[in-house]
Image: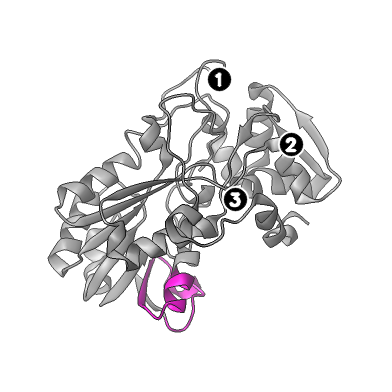
Amino acid sequence: MAVLVAGATGNVGRHVVGRLVEAGQDVRALTRRPGAAALPPEVRVFEGDLTRPETLPPALEGVRTMLLFPVGEAVDEVVALAAKAGVRRIVVLSSAAVTAGYDTEYHYPVEQAVERSGLEWTHVRPGEFAVNSLYLWAPSVKAERRVVDVDLDTPGTPIHEADIADVAAAALMDDRHAGKAYNLAGPEALTHRDQIAAIGEPLRVDEVEPEEAREFYRAQGGWAAENADFLFGFEDYSGATTDPTEATSGVDRQDGGQPQDGERPAGGEAQEQTWEEPDIAWLTCTDITGGPARTYAEWARDRVDDFR
């Protein structure tokens, strides 16, 4: 039986595919642009779109477990098609914002649709993605050796996308993870100042107020501009206007901020992880897989060329 990875070309999905291939699994990848997937030759790549469920049956045929990227638009129909095809378990790439109670409209409805289906489920709920700093800081680092940010001394526990993938791959292959929701964090607490230092470059660092940061990143363009209101506390998960002096910092929206194969950007995945309540039982990938949890410094070494 096969394993299907939706969001297979994203930061997490690509790593999941690699882990499954290494484990000798029959891997299928779902993407809107199969010609640009650049996945291992062993992987069967299917063109499909989670917002257009009618495109999915060929990819679902013979699939036992599935990694589901969180697209809520037609999720009930997608899950129903998976059940009809014989899928046994769905692993949802979700967010710890669900656990914290901040996300009721993005990842949470996807989790609920899977649970309502009667299929086995596992929810993988990362907190702050290390890769957020790439999409936020790399353009200005490359252009002017500069980082602009707020609250530079607020600690977080950014997680390497490969650690998230290790947990997701384990959940896809091992029945012992069924019925579990894992809140994932990196192995160490780091401030943004610490993270900037780990990039290993002599940089100008400007700590600014949220209004100035929002304007800077709107002008920068790309992912940061699209998510600036959310990232700096001017917008909540539902898109409602908030006060950055009162709102909790932005929380992860999915796959490290990088748009997944044309889906809307994963916000923080933009999370400053300053939640004070409720208490969250954070786990590292070591707690789940037994493998070593990757540090932010390791992530920075993996991405060093992206900051040059």
Magenta stretch: residue 27 in it? yes
Coordinates of residue 141 in the picture (x, y in percent): 77, 46
Q: Residue at x 56, y 49 (%)?
A: 159
Q: Secondary structure at mark 1?
A: loop
Q: Between label 3 and label 1, give the one nearer the viewer.
A: 3
- The part of the image, by quadrant, that contains residue 99 is top left
Q: Residue at x 78, y 31 (%)?
A: 206
Kindly indicate whether the residue at mark 2 contacts the one at mark 1 (C-beta within 8 angstroms): no
Residue that badge 1 annotates? 244
Q: Quadrant of the C terminus?
A: bottom right
In the image, is 308 to the left or to the right of 241?
right
Q: Is residue 29 above or below residue 69?
A: below
Q: Earlier in the sequence, mark 1 or mark 2?
A: 2
Residue that badge 2 annotates? 193
- The part of the image, by quadrant, that contains residue 87 is bottom left
For the residue marked with disc 1, what is the amino acid? Pro
**Residue 131, numbered label:** 3
Q: Nearer the viewer, residue 45 or 252?
A: 252
Q: Is residue 269 above or below residue 290?
A: above
Q: Between label 2 and label 3, give the one nearer the viewer.
A: 2
Coordinates of residue 12 in the picture (x, y in percent): 48, 59
Q: Which residues are magenta?
A: 17-42
For the residue marked with disc 2, what is the amino acid? Arg
In the image, is 151 to the left or to the right of 283?
right
